[in-house]
Every structure is written in structure tokens, then in C-alpha cells.
Image (cartoon, helix red, strand yellow):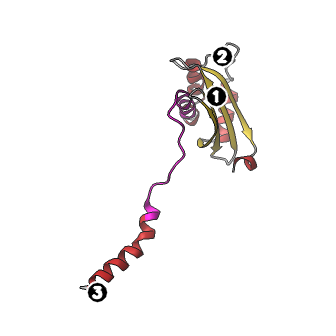
Amino acid sequence: MKRVQLMIACGLLLSLPLLLWAQPENKAQLPDTPVGKRIAGYLAAFNSGQARQVVEFMKQHDGRKDAEPIPLDKLAFIQKDLGKLSFLRTVSAEPEHTLLVVLKSERGRYISLHCTVVPEAPHKITFFRFELTDPLNQQ
């Protein structure tokens, strides 16, 4: 009987690394807030690879009075140059309406995205800054 228990215990110990390796990664996620949802929507449009989707997203959600849309050809170049973007981490958040996050591009570049939305629905974007950043500051 003790031999069977020992074999079971050894089997469990040997399979533990495999079980741990098979566990899903704890992926960073955007906050479930109005501004987090706007950034998620922007990323989905950007990662579609279709410049028109980004322009349409911004037309629908941009509340900035002086904002001018990025020309489609320039936007398409940026999308191709960076590749898909993934959320890396939150740098700072103020209530539910301002968020500064770090993204990582498929091509290994780091981007800071700072976004502020109006507190009231439909949470239009009032500040949007997207820029390349230094990877040494993003550890």
C-alpha cells in the first residue's frame, strides 16, 4: 500500500512542472473603466490593419474640438511600421477618465498612450497622445 502511495506522490511531483507550464499566463489587462474601454477600442481598430477603421473609431469617439484626422496613407504607414500593438502596463490612472499606458509593438517598439475621456457617457475622448517612448524607461 505504501508503495502505491509513494508512486502516486512521485507521479504528482514529476507532473507538477508540466501542470505549471500549462497554466494560462497572467496577461496584463486594461482597466474596465470608460477610458480603458476607449483605449481597447482604439487598439482593436489599430490592430485590424485597416487605417479606415482607426479613422472611423476616432470620428465616433473623438470629442476634441481642434483634432484633425491623420491622413489614411500616413496612418497605414504607421500601422505597417509598428505592426500589432499589445497592452503592456498602466503607468498612471486618475479616477476612471485618464489613463497613461505603455504598449509594445510587434516590431519591438514601445509606445506611450495617454488618453482622457469625458466623465459622462458617451465618454468622448478629450485628450489623446500616442508616441514612441524609450524602452529603458518601461521595465
User: Looking at the rendering, which quadrant does residue 42 occupy?
Assistant: top right
User: Looking at the rendering, which quadrant does residue 68 occupy?
Assistant: top right
Magenta extent: 20-44
Name the residue that disc number 1 marks. 115
Q: In the image, what residue occupies the spot 69% across and 51% down?
A: 139
Which amino acid, by three-letter code, is at mark 1?
Cys
Name the residue that disc number 3 marks. 3
44 with respect to 106 (left or right): left
Which amino acid, by three-letter code, is at mark 2?
Arg
102 with respect to 32 (left or right): right
> x%, y% of residue 57?
56, 24
Name the residue that disc number 2 marks. 64
Tell me if mark 2 has few (under 14), some (14-19) or many (20+) residues whose alpha carbon lies within 10 angstroms of its own: few
23 with respect to 53 (left or right): left
137 with respect to 94 (left or right): right
Between 100 and 112, the one lying in front of the other is: 100
> How far is mark 3 from mark 1, CA to CA?
62 Å
Q: In the image, what residue occupies the spot 65% across and 38% down?
A: 80
| Among the two numbered marks 3 and 1 on one chain, the one whose residue lies closer to the N terminus | 3
Q: Which mark is residue 132?
A: none
- Which residue in the rendered view is the most extreme toward the top? 65
